[in-house]
Image (spheres, helix red, strand yellow):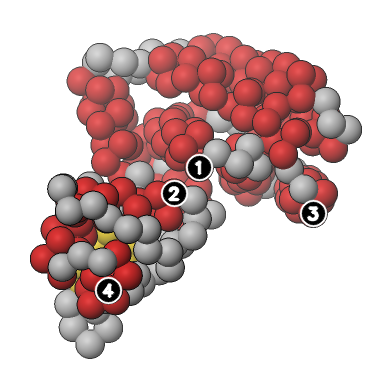
Amino acid sequence: MKYPTAKRRRAYEKVADAIRGQILAGELKKGQKIPPERDLSNGFGVSRVVVREAIRTLEMAGILSVRKGSKGGTFVNDDYDKPLVTSIRNLLWGGSISLDHLFEIRLLLEPPAAALATQRAEKNEIDALEDLLTQTEKLRDDALSLRKGNLEFHRRLVSLAGNPLLTALCQTVLKLLVESMQDRLDLSISLNVLSFHWLVLKAVRDGKPELAQSLLTEDLGVLHAKYQELGASREKTPQAAEKHTSEGKALRGTVNNN
């Protein structure tokens, strides 16, 4: 673990920012136990009180969790994006935003991420993306498995852009759309999405960022249109969201755990 020097003024914020940055950069993994207070104190060159306050700050933000007992310690949360998800969900349930707004944000984020992935992804990462599509293709008659594969493609593609913040934002929007809408999709829609994914993959492999961005824009546009045809893209009510949350629990778990 890296220990950048923290300044005396508001030192706990510097420490908290350093730990948060390492989590978002993937240097500290979800579920990983971070070093004890004493080691952090020595590494950052601050008192244990400062470290304790930094941990408390990150715990309140939902990024870390402190567990007691023989197997206790401080761990990176599996869902450290929960505060962001909760904030946006509250706006959705309160009627300040609709699912259409989430789609709009998705269109603003994911297609440019596809272009970046084309420029930044390594060959082995692109090969892994192709392996995922190959496995998904074998499950094309299983609606639920097909959806899971399609969602995983989007998650991996965005991560190949190499921007942890972009990944976190895209994941948040995708998670909320999944919990609100996944039960409304049918096999034909998922198959159509899969066909787009093969085209996007080819554009990424061929090093064509503009084409990759254009294809993913079209992919999401078609999907949005299908949602609108189903009459649900403007749902805002807590009751509707809660219904989809319950019905989409299994699929959301897959997205969160991958």
Q: What's the distance in space between the residues labelled 3 and 1, CA to CA?
A: 19 Å
Callout 2 touching callout 4 (CB < 8 Å): no
Closer mark to the observer between disc 3 and disc 4: 4
Find disc 3 in the rendering and name its residue. Answer: 124
Type of amino acid at the residue the image marks with label 2:
Leu
Q: What's the distance in space between the residues labelled 1 and 4, CA to CA?
A: 28 Å
Check disc 2 and report its element: helix, strand or loop: helix
Find disc 1 in the rendering and name its residue. Answer: 164
Q: What's the distance in space between the residues labelled 3 and 4, CA to CA?
A: 38 Å
Q: Examine the rendered structure and indicate whether residue 219 appears above or below residue 135.
A: above
Q: Which residue is at 50% across, 42% downward? A: 164
Find disc 4 in the rendering and name its residue. Answer: 42
Q: Which residue is at 88% across, 33% downward? A: 206
Check disc 3 and report its element: helix, strand or loop: helix
Residue 50: x, y in percent? Answer: 15, 61
Residue 10 visible, this orientation: yes
Q: Residue 246: which disc?
A: none
Type of amino acid at the residue the image marks with label 1:
Pro
Residue 138 visible, this orientation: no
Closer mark to the observer between disc 3 and disc 2: 2
Q: Which residue is at 44% across, 14% downward? A: 100
Find disc 2 in the rendering and name its residue. Answer: 24
Q: Earlier in the sequence, mark 3 or mark 1?
A: 3
